Amino acid sequence: MGAVGQSIPSQLCCPGCGQVEQVQRVPAAYQEGQGWYGGTSATIGVAAGRIAYGYGIHEGATITALASALAPAPALRRVGGFLATALFFVPVLVVGVWLGLTVSRHGAPASSNGLQKGSYDFGAWMVPAFFSLPLIGFLAAVVARVRRNSRIRSGQSRAVGVWSHGCICRRCGGVFFPVGTPLEVPTGQVMSVASFRRIVWSAGGYDTA
């Protein structure tokens, strides 16, 4: 709230309730909703007839539901787990292909008829075909996540340019762009947090990410 005798810019007043006391810039509200915690723990016990002492450190980050909803961009998705799983299937697939080639080279037993020979060759390639499916699936997931993360990174600066002009009214629970905002956005009207996020994410080109 401004000091006595100071005029408060009318464009920062909430279009819904006409008040300014609970109005806050979106970046400030976003930062306010994030936190960090840390601590230590110690324990003493007896193991194998001896006194054992344990000591641990724990820390992490917290974010409120409002701050999460006001995020200027979706969270980036990790690709390491999918990539590691995909690499796990590579040696298995290589061995399967080698076995298939070996079996095909030697062929079916001479006493086999045409149908048995066809089944023999088909069975030889079942193992590599079976293990190639999860490999292809995991590699496709890795590519999709990499492309998604790249799209978010490339458009984040444009989204932040829109996001930084927003204001949130704690009294109404809505978000608005002040009148006079130099952007092609709806100004002077209260909207839901979800609508505000849709506008911001659309500016970044990742509204469907």
Image (tube, helix red, strand yellow):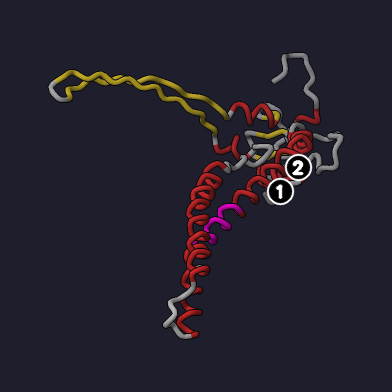
Is 151 included in the stretch rendered in magenta? no
Residue 3: quarter of image: top right
Image position of 175 (left or right of 37): right
Q: Secondary structure at mark 2?
A: helix
* Residue 17, percent from left and from top: 70, 37
Density class for disc 2 (Cα within 10 Å; few <14, some 14-19, many ≥20) is many
Residue 72: quarter of image: top right
Main SS class of the magenta portion in the image: helix
> 42 above or below 161?
above
Screen quadrant of the N terminus: top right
- Along the line of sight, the residue nearer the viewer: 114 or 201: 114
* Residue 202, percent from left and from top: 75, 46
Residue occupying the point 47% across, 24% down: 37
Residue occupying the point 60% across, 49% down: 142
Image position of 59 (left or right of 183): left
> 41 above or below 77?
above
* Residue 173, percent from left and from top: 63, 39
- On residue 207, which mark appears? 1
Q: Residue furthest left?
A: 49
The amino acid at mark 1 is Asp
The amino acid at mark 2 is Gly
- Along the line of sight, the residue nearer the viewer: 42 or 134: 134
Residue 54 visible, this orientation: yes
Residue occupying the point 64% across, 29% down: 29
Image position of 125 (left or right of 168): left
> 36 above or below 79?
above
Disc 2 from disc 1: Cα separation? 7 Å
Dots 2 and 1: beta carbons under 8 Å? yes
Task: State which region is magenta.
Answer: 130-139
Residue behind mark 2? 204
Q: Secondary structure at mark 1?
A: loop
